[in-house]
Image: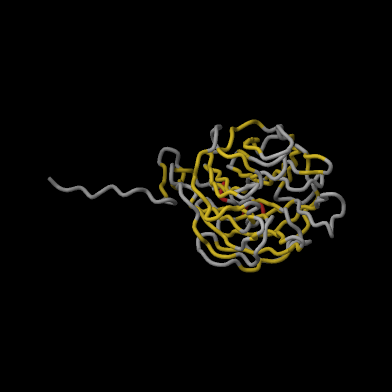
Amino acid sequence: MTEQPPIQPTPVGGLRFNTDTAKLEYFDGNQYVNITTTSPDQHTGGTRGVIAAGNNPSVWTGTYEASEVIQYINVATTGNSIDFGDRTNDAGLPASTADRTRMIIAGGYDHPAMINTIDFVTIASTGNAADFGDLNYTRQNMAAGNSPTRSIVSNGSHSGAHNTISYVTTQSQGNAIDFGDTVTTRSSRRACNSPTRMVIAGGGDPAFNEIEFITMATTGNAADFGDLSQATKYMAGASNAVRGIFANGNANPNYFQVMEFITIATLGNSKEFGDNTHALSHGGALSSPTRFVHIGGAVSPSYTNTLSYVQIMTTGDAVDFGDLLQPQEGANGSSNGHGGLG
């Protein structure tokens, strides 16, 4: 009898041509997924990152006043952000996520109350946001992610922390629908995603280190993924289709500079990636298939306008990208080329 060689597991990112569908596919760790036939280059000449909200009491005066300004960058280059348009409100700490053509901005705190408003912008154009619909609750400080079809938000706070997950179909307009619940009840969490999974990490208050995940095409409750290396809230999270990065954050009284990464298709604890350019909290992040860009942040009472970046599939310290229009914390963003879109 001739001994057969052992069957090797398919590596994450492995390619195949599906002769039944005549499409090229890649293995995401669980299943083969179609490689998208559209790209950011077709829509915006490269991955466009869009940045919304942000607050700084020396710039936007008033009780918990936040910026209504939306900004954008070309993720493949370096340079300062450019004015895009305005939101329909100036709520602080909304959640932002996007598909190839549309970014949504959901919830936030607009003094004197939380709001449930969902705005959207068309990424390839510039201009003011328009009404999309409403969340099924009033909430601020949520985590957000996107598949090619769904925009999903989770957790957040309103008179305490919550474990709710909700979603909308990004290319339709209307109100959010219940998805399920996270394992833990937290606020100030952040997320990253592949086309199939959304991974939600950290949060407070106080700070925690749990990481959970959901399968975005289904509905249902989250499951345990692993742990961050340290308990952290107010991080920034973004990814390509394979690797997610979580950066900075705080656990009172400590502010962190470290960045950590996970492999989205597997389960397990995060690993050290490198350091950001500053120790800070309340920053945001967005990504392309190759780059993670960190947005603003603060070590109270000092605010920064710094944009920094790393190459996602390497490890190492961040370098300067450019500047925001104003120093601010609580700004968040997304792009038309992040990991949830393939």
Position of 117 relative to 70 (above/below): above
Is residue 304 left or right of 45 when viewed as pictured? right
Nearer-the-camera pick, 305 or 14: 305
Going 53% across and 43% down the picture, which residue do you hit? 212
Residue 71: percent from left, percent from top: 75, 55
**Would you say residue 319 is visible in this rendering?**
yes
Residue 199: percent from left, percent from top: 55, 45
Residue 307: percent from left, percent from top: 68, 63
Going 67% across and 43% down the picture, which residue do you hit? 142
Query: Would you identify the image quadrant in which residue 157 lies?
Result: top right
Is residue 311 left or right of 283 when viewed as pictured? left
Position of 217 relative to 126 (above/below): above
Instruction: State the count of labels.
Output: 0
**Would you say residue 341 is visible in this rendering?**
no
Quadrant the N terminus occupies = top left
Q: Residue furthest left?
A: 1
Position of 81 relative to 155 (above/below): below
Query: Would you identify the image quadrant in which residue 236 lies?
Result: bottom right
Nearer-the-camera pick, 225 or 30: 225
Is residue 289 left or right of 50 when viewed as pictured? left
Going 80% across and 51% down the picture, which residue do you hit? 66
Q: Residue furthest right?
A: 62
Residue 93: percent from left, percent from top: 73, 48
Nearer-the-camera pick, 167 or 94: 94
